[in-house]
Image (cartoon, rainbow, N blue to C red):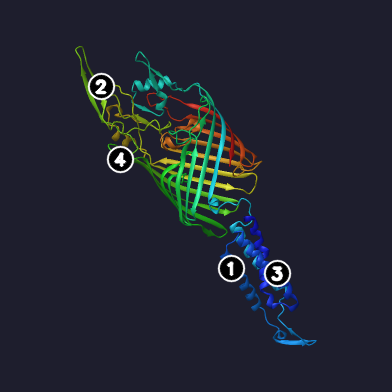
């Protein structure tokens, strides 16, 4: 039925000329009357076939008549047109105004443009035309295949040492507590289950599929599914070699975005990273749960544009349910500006302050001592209260690097399984800057730098919370600041065939500069208390299809254990080979 809509254009064009018939020379009346009848017949056919409605046909006829009448009225009337009638060879002749060819051409063009615009909007004559709402939905995603090889230092501190330090309670501090994981033997002994000296090679995939919909101009929603793990928020990798078992997909994003004005954006739900930052502070794979709002105002300055912006956000980390402690939250604020000095020179900077509330640990008093007496002996054991462990920095959240302490140290000589809590509060102040120079395409230059300082880093505050005698007079150590420098050369983004980019990054991030849970998971296999570099190359094979090669080398800065083990060390080199497709 849609295929007949293209007939509307010639029909309406002819109709406009036909409506002008009273204004043309008499010897054209017969041909124009034929054209008028033909046009009317064509419109009747379109109505009968359901291409256009009867009301729309009547509206088109009326509009064409009005256009023709207005065009004729706008032309000056020559003096000779006032002659009423004369006779030639005794026969009456009616003289009417003459419509120039230029006027008829103008009329045809105006009507043609109007009809073409309507045809485009209503998809006349488009095979398999889809409803207009389809244009409001966008589907995108990417798929990556990766080979990764991790080579660890053979002089790394062994897992057995971490286990010995934990069992022996050597002042109850650590920066890599998961290296001390163990299992209990049948005889009651313990053996380490972690590894710090074994190399590892694996194949991994990453799949992300996103759908966004524009509800109205001001409101949109987005959903993204991704591979990965329900307990790993900073990686969407799925390791192959699971005996051909199926993979799980998780909701990676689910949010609503409202733009009530050009200068304001508000997002809520599980949202993309709202901050201008690097992966030293926030992993590229991290999404935030909560609410964020950003304001921005472009300001023309001479031949450049300065765009100041400000972002605020509130994100719950754990709900508040009795008998738990106060809700754990992250609040943040950032101010900055983007400065487009020219189309080929762009600068951007931002200053942010993030505050983690109620995340720090403290000595946990929520336990009971239970005395058991038999005919031969008396023993004392520990029984936990319902809210025992509320000050834990859980294994499912932490990576490694932050200084942690046992919130349940040895109680009256009874060694209990450790519950680790953060030794320091976290309120990092972060300065981020970037510059893009595209004067020498394809040798574009991209520079980025970030500095962070944990303003809540305070050993005295640690001692106010860690009240057990085990920590009396002990300095928990660690470092409060970090920085990262990055240089990229080549395409600003590898999208097309032949695009390439070289990258070099150096990072030095102290143990307690940022929370290790949310930082990058690749360099040093994740976390803080690391210094090292990354070298990378990406090359576009086809449109949206690229290969990449990265080499990462990192080692620990401070002891991965504590002052009792000052030489504890962890270092690892990683090689990643990627094949990535975006759609």
- The residue that disc 4 covers is 326
Q: Which mark is residue 35?
A: 3
Kindly state the secondary structure of the residue where label 4 is placed: loop
**What residue lies at 75% left-to-right and 87% top-to-bottom?**
86
Mark-to-mark CA distance, 3 and 4: 83 Å
Q: Earlier in the sequence, mark 3 or mark 4?
A: 3
Tags 2 and 3 in contact by the CB under 8 Å rule? Answer: no
Q: In the picture, residue 25 is in which quadrant?
A: bottom right
Camera-side mark, 4 or 1: 1
Q: Position of residue 445 (x, y in %)?
A: 60, 44
**In the image, is residue 397 above or below residue 411?**
below
The location of residue 170, given as percent across then percent down, is 34, 23
Q: Nearer the viewer, mark 3 or mark 4?
A: 3
Instruction: Calculate the distance from the C-alpha at mark 4 to the C-alpha at mark 2.
Output: 29 Å
Q: Which residue is mark 1?
A: 58
Q: How many numbered dots are placed on residues in this image?
A: 4
Q: Is residue 544 left or right of residue 399?
A: right
Of circles 2 and 3, the one toward us is 3
Going by the picture, which residue comes out furthest to the right? 89
Residue 102 marker = none
Compared with 499, 136 (above or below) is below
Image side of residue 339 versus residue 166, left or right: right
* Quadrant of the snapshot with the N terminus: bottom right
Q: Earlier in the sequence, mark 3 or mark 1?
A: 3
Where residue 238 appears, as percent x and y from the top left, is 51, 31
């Amino acid at each position: 039925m849609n295929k007949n809509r293209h007939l509307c254009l010639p029909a309406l064009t002819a109709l406009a000329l036909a409506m002008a018939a009273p204004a043309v020379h008499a010897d054209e009346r017969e041909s124009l009357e034929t054209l008028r009848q033909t046009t009317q017949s064509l419109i009747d056919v379109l109505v009968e076939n359901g291409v256009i409605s009867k009301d729309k046909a009547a509206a088109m006829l009326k509009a064409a008549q009005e256009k023709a009448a207005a065009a004729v009225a706008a032309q000056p009337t020559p003096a000779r047109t006032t002659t009423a009638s004369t006779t030639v060879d005794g026969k009456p002749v009616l003289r009417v105004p003459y419509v120039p060819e230029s006027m008829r051409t103008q009329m045809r063009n105006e009507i043609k443009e109007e009809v073409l615009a309507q045809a485009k909007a209503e998809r006349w004559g488009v095979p398999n035309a889809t409803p207009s709402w389809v244009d409001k939905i966008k589907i995108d995603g990417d798929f990556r295949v990766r080979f990764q090889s991790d080579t660890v230092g053979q002089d790394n501190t062994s897992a057995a040492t971490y286990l010995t330090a934990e069992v022996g309670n050597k002042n109850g501090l650590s920066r890599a507590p998961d290296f001390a994981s163990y299992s209990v033997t049948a005889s009651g002994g313990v053996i380490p289950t972690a590894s710090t000296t074994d190399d590892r090679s694996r194949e991994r995939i990453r799949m992300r599929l996103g759908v966004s919909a524009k509800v109205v101009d001001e409101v949109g929603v987005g959903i993204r599914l991704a591979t990965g793990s329900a307990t790993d928020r900073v990686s969407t990798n799925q390791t192959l070699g699971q005996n051909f078992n199926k993979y799980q997909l998780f909701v990676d994003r689910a949010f609503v975005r409202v733009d009530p004005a050009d200068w304001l954006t508000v997002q809520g739900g599980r949202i993309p990273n709202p901050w201008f930052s690097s992966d030293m502070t926030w992993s590229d794979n991290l999404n935030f749960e909560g609410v964020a709002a950003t304001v921005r105002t472009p300001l023309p300055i001479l031949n450049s544009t300065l765009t100041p912006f400000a972002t605020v956000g509130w994100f719950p980390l754990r709900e508040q349910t009795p008998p738990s402690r106060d809700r754990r939250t992250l609040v943040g604020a950032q101010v900055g500006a983007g400065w487009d000095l020219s189309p080929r020179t762009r600068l951007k900077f931002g200053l942010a302050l993030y505050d983690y509330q109620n995340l720090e640990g403290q000595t946990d008093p929520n336990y009971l001592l239970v005395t058991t007496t038999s005919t031969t002996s008396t023993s004392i054991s520990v029984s936990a209260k319902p809210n025992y462990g509320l000050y834990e920095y859980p294994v499912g959240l932490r990576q490694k690097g932050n200084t942690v302490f046992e919130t349940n140290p040895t109680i009256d000589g009874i060694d209990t399984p450790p519950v680790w809590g953060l030794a320091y509060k976290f309120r990092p102040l972060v300065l981020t800057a970037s510059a893009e120079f595209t004067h020498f395409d394809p040798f574009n230059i991209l520079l980025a730098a970030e500095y962070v300082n944990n303003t809540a880093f305070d050993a005295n505050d640690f001692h106010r919370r860690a009240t057990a005698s085990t920590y009396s007079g002990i300095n928990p150590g660690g470092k409060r600041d970090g920085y990262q420098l990055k240089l990229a050369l080549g395409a600003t983004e590898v999208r097309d065939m032949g695009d390439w980019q070289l990258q070099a990054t150096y990072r030095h991030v102290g143990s307690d500069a940022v929370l290790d849970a949310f930082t990058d998971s690749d360099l040093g296999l994740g976390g803080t208390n690391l210094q090292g570099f990354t070298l990378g190359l990406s090359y576009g094979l086809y449109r949206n299809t690229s290969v990449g090669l990265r080499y990462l080398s990192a080692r620990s800065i401070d002891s991965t254990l504590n002052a009792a083990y000052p030489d504890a060390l962890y270092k690892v080199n990683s090689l990643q080979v990627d094949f990535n497709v975006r759609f």
